[in-house]
Image (tube, grey):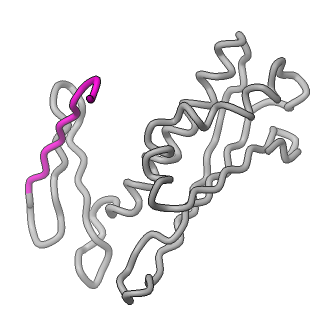
């Protein structure tokens, strides 16, 4: 049973360009496929998926650290989504790799090991997407130290 329902509306503007309406005060976003299908006048569906995964992971990491009253800001996230052909020769997102970078040295944060062990399990989007697309996650601190 769901706890709530999210509705998003799409309205075709021209060819593969759609306005994405979230409702309320949320601004409308335009999406578009890159050439040759579209004109690239907005993010593609794969870019939107990638952004959703990266945003959710960043939010989850920030939330988990703030629970311990830690200030990791500014957090950055780089998402690399591999698009290729599956066994049926259909284009699919074959994998997503996220690199989250903290804005501070890792050794300045208390309870970091505990946070790194659990934060991604609370990420609604990544955990859902990860059931069908492999998602790998790396966390780096401001000094380039790989933490996870």
- Image: 103 above or below 128: above
Write down the quadrant of residue 72 in the picture.
Answer: top right
Residue at 18 percent across and 41 percent down: it is 8
Q: Quick one: quadrant of the N terminus?
A: top left
Q: Is 82 or 19 nearer to us in this picture?
A: 82
Q: Which residues are magenta?
A: 1-11
Query: How far from the left and from the top, in percent, is residue 3?
Result: 28, 23
- Image position of 70 (left or right of 52): right
Q: Quick one: quadrant of the C terminus?
A: top right
Residue at 74 percent across and 44 percent down: it is 139
- Image: 44 above or below 19: below
Write down the quadrant of residue 22 in the picture.
Answer: top left
Does the magenta segment cover residue 9? yes
Q: Residue furthest top?
A: 69
Residue at 38 percent across and 80 percent down: it is 91
Query: How far from the left and from the top, in percent, is residue 31?
Result: 25, 58
Query: How far from the left and from the top, in percent, is residue 80?
Result: 57, 63
Residue at 50 percent across and 45 percent down: it is 126
């Amino acid at each position: 049973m769901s706890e709530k329902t999210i509705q998003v509306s799409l309205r075709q503007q021209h060819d593969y360009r759609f306005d994405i309406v979230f409702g309320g005060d949320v601004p409308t976003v335009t999406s578009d496929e890159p050439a040759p299908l579209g004109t690239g006048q907005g993010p593609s569906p794969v870019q939107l998926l990638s952004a959703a995964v990266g945003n959710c992971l960043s939010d989850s990491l920030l939330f988990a650290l703030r629970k311990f009253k830690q200030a990791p800001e500014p957090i950055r996230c780089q998402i690399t989504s591999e698009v290729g052909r599956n066994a049926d020769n259909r284009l699919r997102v074959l994998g997503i790799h996220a690199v989250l970078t903290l804005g501070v040295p890792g050794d300045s944060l208390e309870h970091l090991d505990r946070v790194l062990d659990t934060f991604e399990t609370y990420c609604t989007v990544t955990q859902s997407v990860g059931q069908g697309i492999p998602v790998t996650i790396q966390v780096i601190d401001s000094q380039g130290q790989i933490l996870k």
